Amino acid sequence: MLIETKKLTKTFGGLVAVNEVDFTIEKGKINAIIGPNGAGKSTFFNLLSGSYSPTSGRIFYKGKDITKLPPNKIARLGVARTFQTTNLFEQSTVLDNVIVGHRLRTESNLLDAVLRTKRFKREEEKCRDKAMEVLDFVGLTHVRDQLAGSITQEEKKRVAFALALATDPEIVFLDEPTAGINPGETEGLADLMEKMVEQQITVCLIEHKMKMIMALADKIMVLNYGEKIAEGTAEEIMNNQAVIEAYLGGDASA
Amino acid sequence: MDILTQQLFNGLTIGSVYSLVALGLTLVYGILHIPNFAHGALYMLGAYITLTLMLLWGVHYWIAMAVSVLVVGLLGVIMDRLVFHPLRNAPPIHDKIAAIGILLFLEAFAQLIWGADYRTMETPYGQVIDLFGMTATMQRVLINIGAIVVMILLFLFLKKTYIGSTIIAMAQNREGAHLVGINTNKVAMLTFMISGGLAAIAASLSAPINLVFPGMGHLVILKAFVIIILGGMGSVPGAILGGYILGFTESLGATYLSNDYKDIIAFLMLVVILSIKPKGLFSREGF
Amino acid sequence: MLELSRVSVDYGGFTAVEQVDITVEEGELVVLLGSNGAGKSTIFNAISGLQKTSSGIILFEETPIQGAAPDKIVQSGIVQCAEDRKLFPQMTVRENLIMGAYIHRRKRKQVNRSLEEVLELFPILHEKRENAAGSLSGGQQQMLAIGRALMSKPKLMLLDEPSIGLAPLIVEQMFEVIQKINQDGTTVLLAEQNAFAALKIANRGYVFESGSIVVQGSSEELLANDTVRRAYIGA
Amino acid sequence: GCIDNPSNEAASESGNESETGTEAPEVEEGEEVVNIGYSGPLSGPAAYYGERTLNGLTMAVEEINDNGGFEVDGQTYKFNVVALDDKYLPNETAANAKRLLQENQTPIIFSPHSGGIKAMQVFNEKENFLIGAYTSEPAATEAGNELTVRIPPSYDGYLEPFTKYAMENHGEKLAALPTASQYGKDWTEALVPYWKEQGGEVVYNSSIDFSKDTDFFTLVTNALKEEPDVLFIGGPSEPTAKVAKQARELGFEGGFIVMDQAKLDEMKSVTGSYEDLEGSVGVTPLINSDYPGTAEFVEKYKEEHGQNPGSEAGYHYVAMYTFMEAMKAAGSVDDPEAIRAHMQEGLDALPEDKQVYTIEEIGENGGFTTNLRIAAVEDGGVVTINVE
Amino acid sequence: MGSLLKKRGWIIGFILAAILFPFVSQNEYFLHILTLAFIWMIAVYGLNLLAGYTGYLSLAHAGFFAIGAYTLGLLTVKAGLNYWIALVLACFLTSAIGAVVGLVALRTREHFFAIYTLCVGYIIYLVIDKWDSLTGGVRGLIGIPAPTNIGPISFQTPLSQYYLILFFLLFTVLVMYRIIHSLTGRTFIAIRNSEDLAQTIGISTMKNKLLVFVISTFFAGLAGALYASFIRFIGPDIGYITIIFDLLTYLLVGGIGTLAGPIVGTFLIVTVSQSLQFLQDYRMLIFGPLLTLLIIFYPRGIVGAYHDWRMKSLAKKKQQLNRKQTYVHTQSTETEKKIKEG
Ligand SMILES: Nc1ncnc2c1ncn2[C@@H]1O[C@H](COP(=O)(O)OP(=O)(O)OP(=O)(O)O)[C@@H](O)[C@H]1O
Ligand SMILES: Nc1ncnc2c1ncn2[C@@H]1O[C@H](COP(=O)(O)OP(=O)(O)OP(=O)(O)O)[C@@H](O)[C@H]1O
Ligand SMILES: [Mg+2]
Ligand SMILES: [Mg+2]
């Protein structure tokens, strides 16, 4: 049990975006969250990664209560995420984007930088190596010197993956990683997610692309109006009447 | 005389002037996200133009003010076209510096034309009146009434007319405004026109109780910035309320706390408010 | 109705769209297919005046419109529903819709009628009509964007990836809505990645790759085309 | 200016052309030029002040040059004023001084603000130039700077006659509301204890910052709360007049003590008539003064600048002539120490018709001592009061 | 590699020019102006680190400049402390106050931060102005000593002060260079680009922002202290808003977020505004529009414009090789350089 939420709730004014959700994420699996627009999926992610603080309920990571931790502390524990709208350092190169990703695993401080200490040199090297490694992993070594703002949408998604991976995570949360990507490229990204799991990195993603989800996910949770309405394997979900009504509709081919 | 009521009235008067200036500032900020440091110079020019018309051609106060509103409004438009429009894609700091350039220019310009000394604006409403035990001049009463009338008109314009709501729409999404067929250049110009006009009204109303000189814009501009921040930048009700809050803080602070430190009190208040509410008292929803 | 001939668009030194010819007849529903970065949005922005073309001619109802200001283009009857929606986040749903009818602002009655029609078309918007647009979820915002575009009663509507990030059920509804709009007499030019669903409702299609058109034809032809199937519909 | 103060009957459009610096003088065969430095606020909010001070200098210099210059040791010289703007900032004054020395070899540099004067005093002895200091701050000369000449009189002399007049005519309760400048503060610090010594009571003591306060009503209301008999006001004439006027609007019926920076005649142009200023006591306006050279100077100044001169112009005018006489006496135009040493002779040699003010002597540490003239507003007019 | 060599070349060129200048010209006025410009440059560097690299535009820096100046002034004049101790204390006191202000101010963002700090700066100014008994109020503080001798080296002459301040400037540049070209610097840039993202990759944004704020106030304080001992008289107006506007102008004209920007901008504006003195009253009439035009036509400052221009010529070459990949910006070379540096 890597992550566990207990009665997690988030309200915005009068609106209950996430409503008493109990959820568990198992290590080494691909977990998916689906649900209609506005169901509260992104909000749920924001709660888990610390970007929002819950109205009530608790979050445990490896048994440790992380409900009140700020996002950067959660990231240090090994939780990484991407955003629904691809959020990169647009003005920097791809490589630079990824180098800072490993910053949280380094110790060197301002004084090291000014005095150019051994530790500083060692860690600069370490971050660069890490960046090259993850860029290689996501298959982007060839664009590393381009500005992040100037590469294609699909490449951006991959950079976002790389950035998340550079933090040495145990689990990554991916918010609609393949939105706006054509089917051919979607497959490539799905392969990448499987490759992550092979590397012992747990994946949790939000998606609307059912075909991909059904093929990929080990476990699926369905949210509707902030509430969990179903949870289970792809097959169970496909045949769940509540889910069909709320979300899938008659034809799930899209 | 009852010092409290008298000071409340004084606070109301200063607050009215502050609000009018801050309104112009907040409108431009809302649309173009420009903290227009040159707004103080528009205020100053508003006073000079009214004054010139009155002295040189003996034009009546109200007519002079109307002309001043037009002229300063147009000046605002020119400023937009020549400076801020070309800078629309630049980062916000640039607007600040460009605005400072304009400010320096306009002040030097005023000094060249009108000289550096203090001028007095005579008002037809100099008579002293007694209001429920308070002393005031007719001009001060006019400032208060004038400000409120202008604010109501502005509010109706923004909320009840289509043209007014284009200003709000553009403040929220410039490209979105394009897509529904709004000519954003025109809206920007209109906003600058209104903003300049408001500055001219504020200056023409308040000039008779103070003096007219090239540096007079400094008196209000810094405070106007405090106000629009206090109110939440871009918020119209925020600017109005902020103006009055600052006016009252000043008059009451000077009376009951310390005259010398009254500015510090006002600024500290802002710092405290922003420390608690980092986005100002009124967010943009209330536009 | 709309005719692009040899249109190119540059970003700085980079040509995003090169020598493109597109025609849309009145009443048609035409789809532009293409992967990310192919140049679909760029073409749309060029048509609606948000982006300057570097060469070529765009004719709308026989008059050239390239280089005209965006508001002029909206007035002539072309409305774009942009990829990132471009709503007025702090205005309510209703106010957003009313702003959509800006070019008809003098015809109060007509505006109110359109408003009712749109709210009827999207019941969820009716429910949320007094909520700020910014507080809606992605899908709701997309509907609002389409609704706002409809408010101006366009002759030609440009829809840029309306299904992006939407739930399957909603996507289905969305395509139904688009079809309905088209059947009600609005010409539609649609950009989509979701090729299968799009082609099902479209008359014709163009396929973009790196800024140029590589395949074009009727929906049936495209659906039958092998390369198209492989690249855009999935095996 | 394009619109003129209503008080300036002799309006003309001469404006700013001649206000900053002289044209380079026409030098004839055998003549030499002595550059005179000036650094003051010529732009920004204090520019009006800078210009007036400069006007006095340039008027004197133009006169001297038009009369063929002056002769020292058989050599004819003409003056040339080099004026630089310092925006009232001390560091700019220092930079300007360096520049004037480097590029124009000025033996004298005038500056009308104490910050600039202090910044120059750091190096003026070492770099050997005289400071023409227009500041009433006694510290400017008391610190013992050998090459500083303080031009205006110090205000000590006013305390006694002002207090006497105000107490006799109005009463013993004083409210102080002068300008927040250093000068205003110094004044208040001197006046308040003196007033108390004379048996008076100080019911309110604060100041107005004319560069920051938008409306004086609030402050005046507070000052009048304790119902004082006398209001001590001061600062630049025009805002000071506003304060007086607003005090009247708020029902104040007592008298004013007007700090010497403000001039009764200039205040009148704001209030419209002397009515609101009835019962004020202040320095005699230059135009109402009767020093031997005053009338001529006032006439000439009006002609050139379209307005009445203030004391800052008058003092600079006299100072310039005095420096010239001192140069003659010292037999040198470029030895600041010698010039400084002969200042008293310069004062003594000053022709009557140039005595816009009569300056009796230069004190031990370099301050001019002027005969004081004070005046009051009585029955709608200015009356001069004799000081024993 | 070429670009790196070129950059080094520029820097060495600048240092040589600055060191040799007094041998070329004995003009004391120029020396004075340059020394003063160096002081401004130090302050501008502080501002640049904050505004250019984390995106937080502080308008309180004139206030911090004044705090540095007054601390040095008061410690030497009133407490009679040794100059060098006072200098160190001035820098640290300024940073300490900076830390307190930053802690609260950095909760706000963008324009709110700018205006918030504007108010803080104004409060600092008002306090200095009103606290007569400590600061001397409007009267200012006189008698501030020049730097005392270190062993045989004396700092009484303008020339020695010139070199002393040049030394501090070079020290500032070195520190800036090293900060910017390090992981720490990257962290700052990451914050400028997107705070949310920076947080989710484990960067404590508050801690880092505060760090930058404190460093940048440190340099403002240093500049202020040097100013006090150079002009040797200070009044409250050195904390007034006009000063921060001047500093900002120097920064923007030079190029915000560039290493050479502060030097280029300060030098340019100081010389231009000095050489416009002959215009007297009309000075601002020319200077104002000039400033505005510079901003309109060189929005990334002189240095930025230079970078852009180099980029363009580079890009042209590249495009001939590879048509597809073009959309280039300045930073890509900066990073190239970083990579090569290792
Ligand atoms: N910051 C916020 N303030 C107010 N309401 C919010 C905020 N963020 C989200 N909401 C509301 O919470 C609800 C859930 O939103 P969320 O973004 O989590 O949905 P989602 O499931 O991710 O939808 P989509 O698939 O469209 O992205 C929506 O009704 C949305 O309007
Ligand atoms: N403002 C811009 N500046 C520079 N290049 C741009 C800009 N906008 C788009 N591009 C580039 O132009 C090309 C076409 O982009 P466009 O957005 O038109 O593609 P698209 O087909 O709409 O893709 P998507 O499916 O991602 O929406 C891409 O390579 C993109 O990187
Ligand atoms: Mg979402
Ligand atoms: Mg697109």
Image (cartoon, coloured by chain):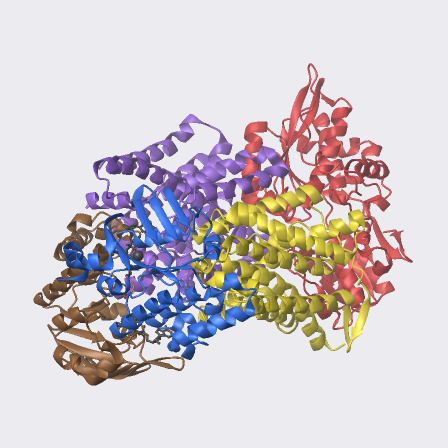
Chain colours: A brown, B yellow, C blue, D red, E purple
Q: Position of residue D209 (x, y in %)?
A: 65, 58
Residue E150 location, quadrant: top left
Question: In this rendering, is residue B177 above or below C118?
Answer: above
* Left or right: E27 in relation to C25: right
Question: In this rendering, is residue C54 above or below C148?
Answer: above
| Residue B100 visible at all | no
Image point (31%, 51%), residue name? A91
Question: In this rendering, is residue B9 above or below D118?
Answer: below
The quadrant of the picture occupied by the N terminus of chain B is bottom right
Residue A207 location, quadrant: bottom left
Q: Where is residue A177 in the image (x, y as percent from the top left)?
A: 22, 65
Name the foreground residue: B81 vs E266.
B81
Residue at the extreme top of the image, as rendered: D29
Total numbered circles: 0
* Left or right: A194 in relation to D119: left
Residue at the extreme left of the image, as rendered: A198
Q: Where is residue E333 in the image (x, y as percent from the top left)?
A: 27, 43
Q: Where is residue C230 in the image (x, y as percent from the top left)?
A: 14, 58
Residue at the extreme right of the image, as rendered: D379
Image point (66%, 69%), residue name? B148
Name the foreground residue: D255 vs B101.
B101
